[in-house]
Amino acid sequence: MGARTRLIDTAANLLAEEGVGAVTLRGIAKAAGVSHGAPLRHFSGRAALLSAVATRGHTELLDRGTSLPDGTPRERLIAACHGYLDFALANPAMFELMFRRDLIDPDDPELTRVSSAVFDFFAALVADVQEGGWHPATDPRLLASSLWASLHGLAQLWLWGGLAGASFAPSPERALAVTLDAYLG
């Protein structure tokens, strides 16, 4: 394993164990057992290193999508929505980092490529459902953006405690079921 990969692995582990705030260049170097300047030999700064970590998160999310079970387009879209929420709840710090434009370099080419692939895959699932008559006149990318925003908001509200203690939301899965019913009927 190369030093760059080791630094990314260490940063990802530190992120999972201690959260976004703990992922500093100095902290990563210490955890990796290298000099505090070593990360800057492989990355232009913290944002570049965190972008590499966030790219891993988007890659994992894309892998979950491309391994959806067979089924109708609607069933596959519902499975993808469940996969998104499951990913967020299982990886809260990674989920946070992936969308923290203040911590990553949103212009990083690999991050842009992979995060765009995730959205394109989701939009294709939406378009497949549209072929069955669901909102056929709506731009599939706009419909996918709206559904994604709902999923993302649900995940964030659950993770940050905004819904977790609410008596009307007994579980994230139940809240997701209501969201999907509102969209897909």
Image: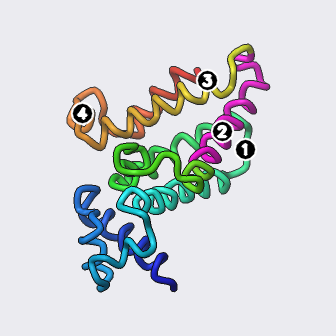
Residue at 65% of width from left, 47% of height from top? 117
* Sequence-wise first label, 2 or 4: 2
Q: Mark 4 highlights which residue?
A: 162
Mark nearer the N terminus (3 vs 4): 3
User: Disc 1 to disc 2, how far (Cα)?
Assistant: 6 Å
Where's the C terminus, which quadrant?
Answer: top right
Q: CA distance from mark 3 to mark 4?
A: 26 Å
User: In the rendered structure, which segment of residues is drawn in magenta?
Assistant: 115-136
Magenta region includes residue 173: no
**Dot 1: within a 10 Å radius of its alpha carbon, few (fewer than 14), some, or many (20 or more) residues?**
few
Placement of 152 over or under 84, stated as above or below = above
Q: Please name the residue shown 67% across and 43% down the image.
A: 121
The residue wearing badge 3 is 142
Callout 2 crowding tier (Cα within 10 Å): few <14, some 14–19, many ≥20: some
Dot 4: element: loop
Query: Residue 2's spot in the image, x, y percent?
Result: 51, 84
